[in-house]
Image: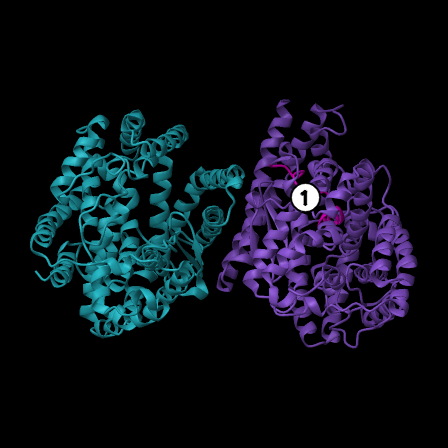
Chain colours: A cyan, B purple
Amino acid sequence: MPTKYAALLEKVYEIHDLGKALAVLSWDREVNMPDAGTTARIEQMTTLSRLIHELSTSDEYGEMIENAAAELNGADYDSNEASLIRHLRRSYEDARKLPSEFVVRASEVTGQAHSQWVSAREENDFASYRPWLEQIIELSQEQAELYGYEDEKYDALLDKYERDMKTAEVRAIFDAVKAELIPLREAIDERGTAVDDSLVHQHFEIDKQKLFARYAAAAIGYDFSRGHLGTVVHPFATSFSQNDARITTRWNPDFLNPALFGTLHESGHAMYEQGTHPDLARTPLARGTSLGIHESQSRMMENMVGRSRGFWQKHFPVLQAMFPAQLGGAAVDAFYRAINKTQSSLIRVEADELTYNFHIILRFELEQAMLNGELAAKDLPEAWNEKFETMLGIAPATDREGCLQDVHWSKLYFGYFPTYALGNLYAAQLFETAVSQNPAITDELAQGQTTSLVAWMRENVHQHGRKFTPRELILKATGKPLSHEPFIRYASEKFSDIYGL
Amino acid sequence: MPTKYAALLEKVYEIHDLGKALAVLSWDREVNMPDAGTTARIEQMTTLSRLIHELSTSDEYGEMIENAAAELNGADYDSNEASLIRHLRRSYEDARKLPSEFVVRASEVTGQAHSQWVSAREENDFASYRPWLEQIIELSQEQAELYGYEDEKYDALLDKYERDMKTAEVRAIFDAVKAELIPLREAIDERGTAVDDSLVHQHFEIDKQKLFARYAAAAIGYDFSRGHLGTVVHPFATSFSQNDARITTRWNPDFLNPALFGTLHESGHAMYEQGTHPDLARTPLARGTSLGIHESQSRMMENMVGRSRGFWQKHFPVLQAMFPAQLGGAAVDAFYRAINKTQSSLIRVEADELTYNFHIILRFELEQAMLNGELAAKDLPEAWNEKFETMLGIAPATDREGCLQDVHWSKLYFGYFPTYALGNLYAAQLFETAVSQNPAITDELAQGQTTSLVAWMRENVHQHGRKFTPRELILKATGKPLSHEPFIRYASEKFSDIYGL
């Protein structure tokens, strides 16, 4: 191995290991830590973060990257080495663009803004949060200028979550999604057959839910021998290596969907991490390439697999045997319809597969307007409600159920939201390609099996980790740039069938 | 705050936080991590260990300690500041005494010796382990020379587990223990009333054992709001701060004692950490001062409280209500006798409160002989069996149940064993003093309450953390140096009563 690249790798491993240690502390905080341990844990995490930041923004590290890059000059673009250098250069440049003064100031403002948001939401008091949102908007504008951009300010922020994606592209795609999905939603509202979901709104003992969630996660291909299921308030997936990729769930005793489909969702995320190529271990390439592609894997497992007919034809009898009183007499088709009910609702995290996209597009449009100075913080509630009405046909009665519902803005996460809906679109495009290349996938899914589907994802998505940008990956995997069409085809077919359109 | 001391504290906090991060990774490895995650976890832990070692042995750190010491010159001996400087100087000196070359070599040898020990124990094949034990003995001798000593070689190693304790002191005390306990054990064997412990050897559902273990741990004073109970193969306690001190347990469905008294034992350890003074937080003083004093707190809670009549007069009805089929008809006194049965046995970790001390004294004597070149590795099995026979009246038929049973030597832990028995002695001396100073403690214990006992330990032991050496602490707390007499009084009275001597 070239010596300068080898020296760089040692430093990369060190930074990586510290980052994973930080991830373990964070996971433990959510899953096991007593609340009383918070202060000390924040101190420990701050020390680790500071060390990581120092190591990964030092002049020395920059020189190591450049020396290794010079040494590797001419390496194949697709090689692990060249991919790592590309990634490290971009991350290093990004990290150096934010002066410490800005990072400290942003951290102070978001710390307070977050607390203010918590109480504002509790008390449905947008006015008390407004001054903080104003500061957040200003910080986001400043951050965008620090990162820099060619076309639109929003590009600078979106790039941090979805590398190289342009705002104009997302806008065009989301506009097309709206143009297709709003009529579909309206048709379901006006002419669709009613769907009764009382089946899933019963009492389900949590211990048995846990057993079934594990069964279902294993059934879609989550490898428990390289994972762990923990209980938390706000579910997430995380990985400490490709051989230790964990999922978390929260349990609701009176509604089957959240824990069950939440577990499948997080399993999809963790399977992506479990599937990265071992050669990428201990480098920042050993993870999903972007939030959007990550979300494609979780949504695919949650919805396209976990809410499919085939999956439940195979596995519903097991669920029935576990809950005979609740589900014993139910037909699998009634259950399939119940878990796929679509209906406009106010809260994003409770939205169904179809209407969820509107929640995202709305936020995407509003945060651009705020960033560009076209929408003032004080006018957010009104703008929110107007857009909501247009896309979802209803509007929230309170800001608590409206523009105060999400944590993201208080954390300065402008540019994050669109990745959720991009995930749905990537998922459909990847799924359609996989099925067209290997028809056995469809047959297996009809039997509740995912072996060939997961193998295809492993080959075309997972193994590459972060070697390629989402744009490169989707082109490599599907032969085409991202399009809204596969998702529209998938959603139209599925919901037209369920609602008898 | 003096500026050089303040600068030192910042560095101390940093090293401390990294040490606690390492502890979280270690805890997670035992409690949650899938086995497949081992390789990556070892890499992460090695990176953290290396960073901690670099920071805490650097020339710069040594200068910071000395600069702060000069600045604080004349500070009260008992002050946190002077105590921290004392501790840091000693730790720094110790760490610098071992050259990296030795540390690396020792780590390689123990890594292999440990694997060899695992298979040698499995196959009861001492001969295959003998060459490794020889290397371990040589390494221990070398280590003792590197640390240096005034009187005896063993002092150099004992000091690392029980700061400032001398081998000659321990020898005198252990000889006195032997002189008193061997006749007591023989009297019990020859003239004692038989004790039937079949009550605790029944099937006890693990879920209910877990509930009761939590109940009992809370009853003795372990604060679950600042703790956590996890399940592991080899139980331990650990703390990430005084507000996050955790215990672990393993569960045996057919024997009540291991999980129940194991939980109380680990709770005693964790209560010590929970009780350190908040002003010591984020420094190495925020933990128990030595293995022996730590063990005093765990043994006190396990045996002097957890195996007392008073505790069970109060709490046995709760246990009975949980296990009516197993214990419903039993008298509390029969249960008290069952959990206090004493009988010579071969395996240290299964030994009872009384005979446990012999297991330790035997190891203490043997490891000195090996260290001093008076006992060759090849002669260990014979020497082991001879001493066993003398102290316990029985001898193992196999090395697997004899000199191959413990992990410690393969890990180079010469000097560690005596702290287990010292713990029993410290416990009795502290307990006797506490009761003499506050008679309410006895009354409370007769009611199954530990409030005043824990308050006394908090005041006289816990809060000081590592400010004082064990010798200083025991003198401060009890007014006397360590003596075997309180333990002998306690054990003679308790077991004479149970066995009707």
Q: Is residue B482 toward the left or the right of residue A349 in the image?
A: right
- The residue sitting at the front extreme is B329
Q: Say which amino acid is labelled 1.
A: Tyr
A160 within the magenta span: no
Q: Give whichever of A37, B378 is nearer the camera.
A: A37
Residue at the image point whose x is 18% and y is 64% from the top: A432
Q: Give whichever of B293, B107 is nearer the camera.
A: B293
State the extent of the magenta-drawn residues as a range: B282-298
- Tell me the quarter of the picture where residue B280 sits: top right
Badge 1, how many Cα within 10 Å: few under 14, some, many 20+? many
B293 within the magenta span: yes
Q: Is residue A452 above or below residue A85?
A: below
Residue at the image point whose x is 12% and y is 60% from the top: A499
Asked if residue B232 can be seen in this view, the reply is no
Q: Give whichever of A88, B208 is nearer the camera.
A: B208
Q: Secondary structure at mark 1?
A: helix
- Tell me the quarter of the picture where residue B164 sits: top right
Could you tell me residue A469's position as x and y percent? 27, 52
Asked if residue A424 can be seen in this view, the reply is yes
Residue receiving disc 1? B272
Q: Is residue B497 above or below residue B10?
A: below
Q: Give whichever of A82, A195 is nearer the camera.
A: A195
Q: Is residue B252 above or below residue A124?
A: below
Could you tell me residue A265's position as x and y percent? 32, 57
Q: Quadrant of the N terminus of chain B?
A: top right
